Amino acid sequence: MNKNPYEVLGVARDASDADIKKAYHKLVMKYHPDKNPGDKSAEDKFKEVNNAFDILKDPQKRAAYDRFGDAAFAGGNGASAGAGFGGANPFGGGFRFDMGGGAGMDDILREAMRGFGFGGFGGAGATQGGAQNAAGRDLLDEVVIDLKDAYFGKTHTVKFSSNVACEKCNGFGTADGKPAPACTRCGGSGYVHARQGFFAMETPCPECGGLGRKIDKKCTTCEGTGTTNKARTIEVKIPAGVDDGTRLRLAGQGEAGANGAPAGDFYLDVRVRPDKRFERRGADLISRVNVPFATLALGGEIDVQTIDDKTLSVKVPAGTQVGEKLRVRGHGMPARRAGSFGDLYIEVGIEIPTKLSEKQKKILTEFAQSKPEKKGWF
Ligand SMILES: [Zn+2]
Ligand SMILES: [Zn+2]
């Protein structure tokens, strides 16, 4: 098992290269097998010192050690260490991994390589396993619709241009339009292994550039990328009863991935414009209607408009007060359960006449001056 190289060499974390070299030379002389013939512990020490120097003399390895710390040596011991790469990833992937028990240096570096340099776009790459699987980006659009459209549902047409799989080569980037053969150097993984000391490094395959496939003759249309930019039209079916703020997802309708990698998704955010006539509360609708004073007092019927532009006759009970709500079942918005609807509530206001005939004035005056009789009035 390897030990902390700083401790092995007896130098500080911020030791200079010269100090490290000096410490190494001193120890290597001390434990050299020539000076300690047959001494097993000296031989082990000698190896340790060499291993430690191997790390600390190399700025890259030293930085890697500093980054992962002792976790590099904890493999198999169930040590848990988290290392967040979100901030450092130039591709904005927000890539993280948690090194749980037993994760070795190989895993760490492999993930680190992917996260840093070859993670594809939009964060998908890191989890999709490398450069050869650079998934296409997700696309997002927004539409504002009327409440009536939300009631009936609507087909929204989006026109835009994005990367699509190249038609000439079927997205493979090859001149013959067939999948390119796996790269012989990396066996199709896109990575090559390099072991330096105890560091197992995986770096993008220099032969295929991390693609995992070797394209001998590139498609001339897409120059081997497998994608072309194209004007597109997508029809998004907005379901009846859609709520304001709903995000609809069309799987696989985003940008095409490189060289046959999965496409991203297309998202449509639906906003529902407030309506002048109806206020929405979940699946219910509220409509404010002014009712003639006499109808409220005597009872009667009024005509109300529904969201789907029908006219309904609604009963008004005698003595209905301003602000009361009359319920009209099933004339609200389509509810979540298919085929069911919310209710329409008529919130009652009062209609005060502004132009009265002489006759009406006379009646109203009489009414105002009258007193309720024992057996009712009017
Ligand atoms: Zn390769
Ligand atoms: Zn092509």
Image: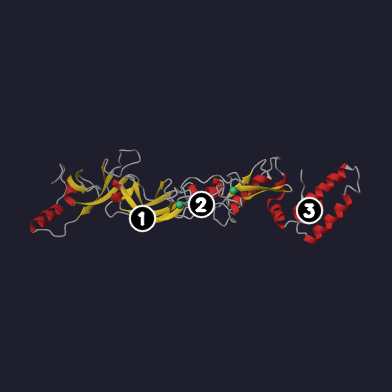
Could you say where residue 5 lies in the image, as x and y percent from the top left? 77, 51
| Camera-nearest residue between 284 and 62 | 62
Q: Earlier in the sequence, mark 3 or mark 1?
A: 3
In terms of secondary structure, where does tag 1 sit? strand
Q: In this view, does 250 lie to the left or right of 6?
A: left
In the rendered structure, which amino acid carries the disc numbered 3? Phe
Q: Is residue 127 left or right of residue 14?
A: left
Disc number for residue 159 = 1
In the rendered structure, which amino acid carries the disc numbered 1? Lys
Residue 84 in view? no
In terms of secondary structure, where does tag 2 sit? loop
Disc number for residue 53 = 3
Could you say where residue 236 lies in the image, as x and y percent from the top left? 35, 48
In the rendered structure, which amino acid carries the disc numbered 2? Lys
Instruction: Name the residue beneath numbered marker 2.
Output: 217
- Examine the rendered structure and indicate whether residue 315 appears above or below residue 23: above
Q: Distance between the residues labelled 3 and 1?
A: 60 Å
